Amino acid sequence: MEKKDNQGAWRGCLRPLAWVGLVLLAALSACSGKVPDWIDGQDPRYPSASYLLAVGVDPQRGQAESMARAKVLGPLAEAGEPGEALARDWHRRGGESSRDRYAQKMEAVRQQIFESVEKEVAIGDVWPGYDGELFHALALLERERGAKRLRKLLAEADAKLVAHWDQAGAAASPLEAAAGYIRTLEDLDRRQAVARALATLQPGSAVAPTALDDAEVRARANAAVAGIRFGVEIRGPRAENLRGMVIRQLTGLGMTLAPPWDRDLELRGTLQEFPGSGRGDVGVSCAVEVIAEGQRSLGTWRFSAGRESNSGEDTGGEALGALGEKLASLLVEKILQGG
């Protein structure tokens, strides 16, 4: 009986020890899910010379993977912003509408770079964290595979710029020539953006220079715009003031004011002035048609501009100034688009 009692006592002592052992085993099991080597964006399986790596973290696995994909492509999208931006100066001088158009075109280039290389991004691994509540995803991009896609974009950019250069050289009018040369400058900006992305993806990779000289293209564009002869025919109250503002802006771009029988472009419109709701407030509106080479209509616009005056001062001049900027901007945009 005494022996049995001793055995029971031993069993009683072993029960808490067994429980402690199970707890320790569970703790060791949890610790076995150690932090992966790639958690800081480095992994011996994917050497940096051959791969771009990025890590995304989110409670949702899908979101973590999407974040990792976007991060690995981020440097390429940032590189898509051209450095010198050859065509930007033309669009800046063209006014807000033209600047916005240029910005949209360059954003489309960056998006094209992103979408092209995105097809080569893969998710290499996913770690759920110690508690399984925060997913870590590893995205990887093999540099050479991505570079092949960027070289294809580069070839497409080269083909476009040569085509626009040839079209500009064969243009029958200064308007068409100016549009062709400015488009060529935009193509050079596009090519530069792709080349910068390629250099980011494959540092030291050789990019063949284009056959066109940047300075020559800019000189041709300047000469073509200077060859555009224009006129402004606007009627209505203060029309002469508005006409003078538009002429100053267009001649500032290098265009030449010409008589009615010798014009490549002509603005025809009617200016109207109307009072605002408050004392001293004033607005102006105008319907303007742009005529190319004496007969071809490039479009008609109807818009207005206004200024409020809390002091009761007449702000008609400011409203006219705003309207003049719009007119000049729209005309320059038409020139950049080739009509």
Image (tube, helix red, strand yellow):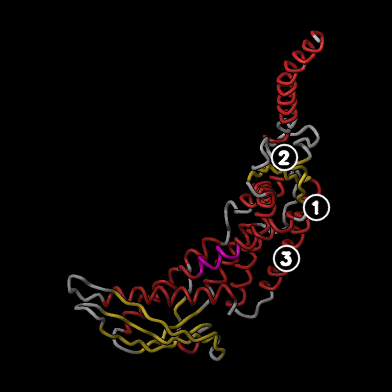
Which one is nearer the viewer's eye here, 201 or 158? Answer: 201
> Is any part of residue 142 visible from this angle?
yes
Answer whether labels 2 and 3 touch (C-beta < 8 Å): no
Badge 1 density bin: few <14, some 14–19, many ≥20, Cα 10 Å: some
Task: Inspect the magenta stretch and tell me whether residue 99 lies in it.
Answer: yes
Residue holding disc 3: 162
Q: Amino acid at mark 3?
A: Val
Q: Residue at x 27, y 78 (%)?
A: 316
Residue holding disc 1: 148
Quadrant occupied by the N terminus:
top right
Q: Quadrant of residue 338?
A: bottom right
Q: In the rendered view, would you say 53 is above or below 182?
A: above
Q: In the rendered view, would you say 220 is above or below 146?
A: below
Task: Inspect the magenta stretch and tell me whether residue 323 lies in it.
Answer: no
Q: Which residues are magenta?
A: 98-106
Residue holding disc 2: 127
> Is any part of residue 196 visible from this angle?
no
Camera-nearest label, 2 or 1: 2
Badge 3 density bin: few <14, some 14–19, many ≥20, Cα 10 Å: some
